[in-house]
Amino acid sequence: MNSMHSLAVNGSSDSAAESVNSSINRSEAAQRFSSEASNPEVLAIKRRRTISPAEKRRILQAYDRCKTAAERGAVLRRERVYSSMLSGWRKHDRAALVTPRRGPKANPAVAQRNRDALLTREIVRLRRQLERANLIIDAQKTLCILLGLPTAEEQEALDK
């Protein structure tokens, strides 16, 4: 008690108590964390690398062109991929080629009817377009005749 009292008399008890408090309650790591927490700058979060299907095909082709294990290892290091990733990509590609379409099976008769209906609509649309084009051509011929200009047919005959 006397030692505490003597510190209080000297006026150094507050600073000593603070230093003891800070070393006990706030370690160096905690002090660093608190100073970083007060930093208003927002740090970017590193995102996981995504590899596009085109890039996967390119890497697989480069790997398949290699003749030795050293060349294959160099390709893996350069592209920053593992051999297990390559085998997974290949397995996924094979599954996509072999796996049948999910859902009910297509009825060939219904599919044929749908194709026929689509083609019929296309024929009707094209016939209307042809009729309009013929009307425009007839109007142009009539206008040329009224204005006394040569029609396209007469112009072709003159050019020959």
Image (cartoon, grey):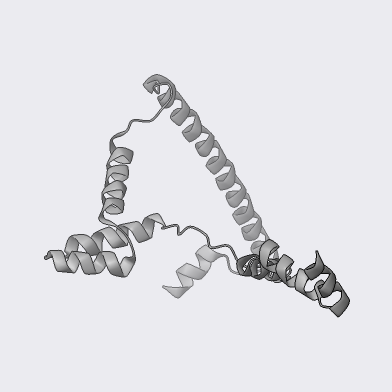
In the picture, measured across the screen, residue 108 lies left or right of residue 87, that is: right
Which percent across, then down, holds residue 98? 28, 35
Q: Nearer the viewer, residue 150 or 125?
A: 125
Q: Name the image quarter holding the N terminus.
A: bottom right
Which percent across, then down, holds residue 52? 41, 57
Q: Name the image quarter holding the C terminus.
A: bottom left
Residue in the image at 88% along x and 76% along y: 9
In the picture, measured across the screen, residue 26 lies left or right of residue 100, that is: right
Which percent across, then down, holds residue 31? 67, 69
What residue occupies the far left of the structure in this picture?
A: 68
In the picture, measured across the screen, residue 65 lies left or right of residue 146, that is: left
What residue occupies the far front of the structure in this picture?
A: 2
Residue in the image at 47% along x and 73% along y: 158
In the picture, residue 17 is in which quadrant? bottom right
In the picture, residue 142 is in which quadrant? bottom right
In the picture, measured across the screen, residue 144 lies left or right of residue 130, that is: right
Which percent across, then down, holds residue 99? 32, 33
Q: Nearer the viewer, residue 143 or 137?
A: 137
Q: Nearer the viewer, residue 151 or 132?
A: 132
Badge count = 0
Q: Is residue 129 above or below residue 104?
A: below
In the picture, residue 43 is in which quadrant? bottom right
Residue in the image at 31% along x and 49% along y: 89
Q: Nearer the viewer, residue 50 or 111?
A: 50
